[in-house]
Amino acid sequence: MNILPIHKDISEYLKKRNLERKFIKQLTLLKIDVSYPSLEVELLEPKSLKIWSFRLDKKYRAVFIFRGSNVIEVLDVNNHYR
């Protein structure tokens, strides 16, 4: 699985909240196995948009899409309960 570089705003968000290491760890797991249990990958509503998320920790999730069959683009990282 290939992962596109993240946007500067996402990188700043991660740094500001001290989430960089968690993000890299979870992104590495995502590259290896999208169905890895600790990622808790889920298809978001409406499902027809095919937007997915994975868990960074209990509070934060990353939102992503598949660009083709083997490429992932992270669109956002946010508070899971906002």
Image (cartoon, helix red, strand yellow):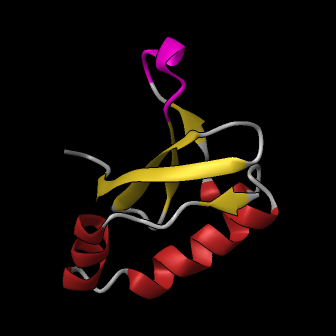
Q: Residue at x 33, y 64 (%)?
A: 7
Placement of the N terminus among the 4 image quadrants: bottom right
Front-most of residues 69 and 57:
69
Tell me the quarter of the picture where residue 29 sits: bottom right
x, y (%) of residue 4? 55, 60
Tell me the quarter of the picture where residue 46 sits: top left
Residue 41, placed above or below residue 79:
above
Was residue 16 drawn as part of the magenta stretch in this picture? no
In the image, taking residue 47 as reference, residue 59 lies left or right, namely: left
Front-most of residues 59 and 21:
21
In the image, taking residue 18 as reference, residue 51 lies left or right, namely: right
Which portion, as a residue range, is magenta? 45-51
Was residue 46 drawn as part of the magenta stretch in this picture? yes
Q: Residue at x 47, y 19 (%)?
A: 49
x, y (%) of residue 12? 22, 77
Residue 19, placed above or below residue 32:
below
Q: Residue at x 76, y 49 (%)?
A: 35
